[in-house]
Image (spheres, rainbow, N blue to C red):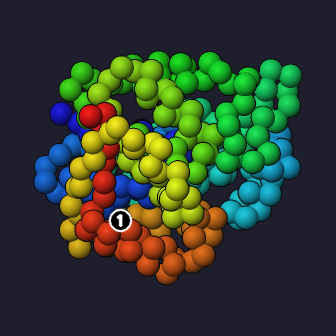
Amino acid sequence: MRWIYLSPHLDDAALSAGGWIYDQIRAGNSVEIWTVMCGVPPTTELSPFAQALHYQWGMTTAEEVVHGRRREDVHAAAVLGATTHHFDFPDCIYRQGRNGDWLYGDVFVDPHPDEADLPARIAETISARLKPDDNLLCQFSIGKHADHILVRRAAELLTHPLRYVVDIPYLFNTPEQLPPHTAGMKATVERVSEAGLASWQEAIEAYASQISSLFDSPEAMREQIRQYWAENRGIRLWQPA
């Protein structure tokens, strides 16, 4: 029996559940992180939006970003003890529509109509690897990031039992978005040890290119994760009642 975390990007699983992943593995569980939107795009051309993000991350080409972030992900997973699988769907900042236009000049938007078939294609890719007794987790899409929404839609097409974990750090900025997602669901608290908390923070810090985008500093990240952990001394999961 495996625990499979569907991670929209190369950091989302560690951000949202890193401490529990660490403790699960120490308890003898098999845990895998499947990152969906981490493929190299088919063109070297970049939108102005992607260029601005590359500058912020200190990288130049999409290939450099993807391979650099994949290395960060392998490092973070090693801290936790998890296995990684990287799928080849490009991040939304690199995707183009049928007419060649860039689909996204912001990430916190509804998925573009040109991508109506994308959840089904993602679901097909996931399904090919999924086993009947796998425990599958995905994020709610708190924060309304287009890629998070698309991956959740894909997960829900699978008709496989599904648990939900909250999107960190987007919950910190938009806590009002959580109740509508959890209405009618059953919540459980999964305890995370002090060692799990420390490894959670260390794993997030392994995503060095992303810290400035997500938190003010590594120190701020560590404090916010500690505060979040302290609310339940762990994390909450939800599933349909």
Residue at position x 63%, y 40% in the image: 146
For this view, does 23 lie left or right of residue 4?
Answer: left
Question: Taking 120 as reference, is 161 above or below it?
Answer: below
Residue at point 38%, 74% (across, down): 227
Query: Which image quarter: residue 103?
Result: top right
Quarter that holds the N terminus: top left
How many labels sit on residues? 1
- Residue matched to label 1: 200
Residue 76 at x, y percent in the picture: 41, 59
94 relative to 143, above or below: above
Viewer-proximal residue among 142 and 93: 142
Q: Secondary structure at mark 1?
A: helix
Viewer-side residue, 111 vs 222: 111
Residue at (50, 59) in percent of width and height: 175
Residue 61 versus residue 159 in the image, above or below: below
Quadrant including the C terminus: top left
Q: Is residue 174 visible?
A: yes
Q: Residue 161, relative to residue 16: is it above or below?
A: above
Q: 199 or 104, which is in the foreground?
A: 104
State which quadrant residue 191 falls in. bottom left
In this rendering, would 239 be left or right of 124? left
The crowd level at tag 1 (other Cα within 10 Å; few <14, some 14-19, many 20+) is many
Location of residue 91 in the rendering, given as x and y in whole percent from the top left corner: 64, 41
What residue sits 68% from the left and 37% below the top?
Answer: 110
Instruction: Inspect the image, locate mark 1, and give the three-letter code of the amino acid beneath it.
Output: Trp
How far across and down, in percent of the image, does residue 51 sit? 81, 53
Left or right of 190 in this view: 101: right
User: In this view, which residue lies farthest toward the bottom?
Assistant: 219
Task: Give x and y (percent) for residue 125.
Answer: 47, 22
